[in-house]
Amino acid sequence: MVDETTGMTFPRILLRHAQVRPERPAYREKDLGIWQTVSWARTAEEVRALACGLAAMGFRRGMNLAIIGDNRPRLYWAMIAAQCLGGVAVPLYQDAPAADMAYVLDDAEIDFAVAENQEQVDKLLEIKQSVSRLSHIIYEDPRGMRNYTQPELHAYDRVQEMGREFEREHPDFFLREVEAGGPQDVAVMLYTSGTTGKPKGVCQTHASFIAAATGGAGFDKLSEKDDILSYLPMAWVGDHLFSYAQALAAGFTVNCPESADTVMNDMREIGPTYYFAPPRIFENMLTTVMIRMEDAGWIKRTLFHHYMEVARRVGADILDGKPVGALDRLRYQLGKLFVYGPLKNVLGLSRVRVAYTAGAAIGPDLFRFYRSIGVNLKQLYGSTETCAYVCLQPDGKIKFDSVGLPAPGVEVKLADNGEVLVRSASVMSEYYKRPDATAEVMDAEGYFHTGDAGFFDSDGSLKIIDRAADVGRMASGQMFAPNFIENKLKFFPFIKEAVAFGHGRDMVCAFINIDMDAVGNWAERRGIPYSGYTDLAGKPETYDLIAECVEKVNADLAGEALMSGTQIHRFLVLHKELDPDDDELTRTRKVRRKFISEKYRVLIDALYTCKASQYIETQVKFEDGRQGMISADLKIRDVKTHAPMKQAA
């Protein structure tokens, strides 16, 4: 692993790898069904050619380079090429519509953009008139681009050819530019998800991400022998920490899948040793497992449920090295042979040594499931503004309901109102062009105000309750933390999304999104016909199924001293999936509560006025950009609650 030293930048780390481990694999990419491997030495050559090509086209120190597309080695190289020249990489969410991209491109003052393929180029050309500074678009994949004649378009390969010609004429240019860069230069600008307003550009320096990367890599003993599968959006801070900063810091191999549709197959082939996914991915994996078990034969189902009970009882203790009886150890080993091993192989987790989740709170039951089958799943806590580096969980000291201890080099304290405050070398330098917003979250002592509410337990582990702005009070004075309730609901494979309401109210109610795959499979096995999502969501049988899940959550909440008074009294199943394209979720699938509360006000009113149903018409955006209307008469269901547990004095 690269030592953290004064003067280190990502380009210098790359050049060091090219000298120290030139033939070690740096990147792999699956193309046309075949894994292609690129060494550190060749990576340095490719980056050098691209950087010089950008310089030949006029890219210079202080400029920002937009990067748009799926995880591709050449897009990661574009990031470091910009940094070699003293520029700033600005990755965008590849699934964002053109209008959302236009805002970021304009706000970040983008002149140069590197796009993966024709789809992304078309978006850029569509908005070019409104983004006047955008003058150069470099496309990585030439397929479909033959008849594009716009002068601002440049093929990636051609830019590298220009770079090699430029370097022959200026042989000292590249190394001189790399040496001119410093650790306090801004390396990357990552835009926030925009949960409460327009996204803001978070400026992170080389020093900040290198501090987070080396701290985390040392904590988990990562080395050049590790492998990671890079499939999450490059614009997300989690991917940038794991697939870019830590990959460079530790020198391990970054594997890029062929497409979003082949991720699971590619994961099984690669068998990563280091894995990172937001809770939604782990939820989807579990949903897939449960669906397959429902379709399995009686013997397989019986074995699965028997040994999963063994795993739930002793699996986590065995993983943490705690004492477990000999008979239970034998049972667990049999379970490993018949169930856990094959299950991990199907999920592509057989070789995983360390797995992390972050980005949102994960339900304790979901967390417990993976650890019980031997996956060393841990939580980390952080944000875009902290390089996703605040708290980590040490091996052997895992708590399902905490996010761990302050990471090496990080100071964490709580404000009087319970808000989590963070000070470290990994805290952002500023929000781009937003001194007002920067001043709101950075205090005079250098602490970043996260906006999350939490508390420390007796062992010093941090527990996050919810976003501080989302934590409210019931009419009775009982604390109301909607995300805490929603995560319990989303543990069930039949529930994809949930939104809980209760602040200032005398009871909690909820919207539910069903998981189409899980509920669809469940309905088909029971001979329940349906024509689509809206029809299936409104079926009485679906409501019965979801009611069972909600009542189990209520039973769980009844045992939580702080949350027992926030059990769900009524719910409805929404007629459409909450969607980022309809502004109901952020690109990282966080609920936009205020927007949803306004958009579905009529449904919330119906929940709290004891109506049995409510008709609604909703405008939606289709993938091709068209708009339409979906209407339905939504049923509202009352569910069983339990006597609240008395709160501890």
Image: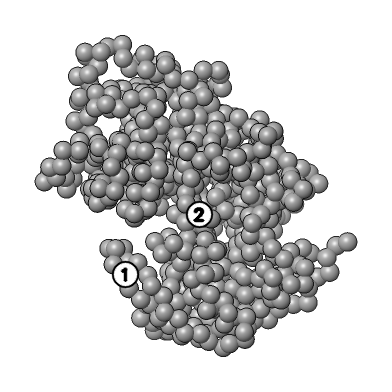
How far across and how far down the image is residue 581, in percent? 39, 61
Mark in the foreground, 1 or 2: 2
Name which residue type carries label 1: Gln
Quadrant in which the C terminus is drawn: bottom right
**Depicted 585 relative to depicted 567: above or below:** above
Asked which secondary structure carries label 2, the reply is loop
Mark 2 sits on what residue?
A: 197
Residue 494 left/right relative to 164: right
Q: Is residue 300 visible?
A: no
Residue at image point 53% right, 36% down: 430
Q: CA distance from mark 1 to mark 2?
A: 23 Å
Residue extending farthest to the right is 649
Residue at image point 51% right, 85% down: 614
Mark 1 sits on what residue?
A: 627
Name which residue type carries label 2: Gly
Residue at image point 39% right, 27% down: 62
Residue extending farthest to the bottom is 612
How far across and how far down the image is residue 505, in percent? 69, 74
Residue at image point 36% right, 43% down: 106
How far across and how far down the image is residue 363, in percent? 62, 59
Residue 55 left/right relative to 181: left
Residue 265 left/right relative to 558: left
Asked which secondary structure carries label 1, the reply is strand
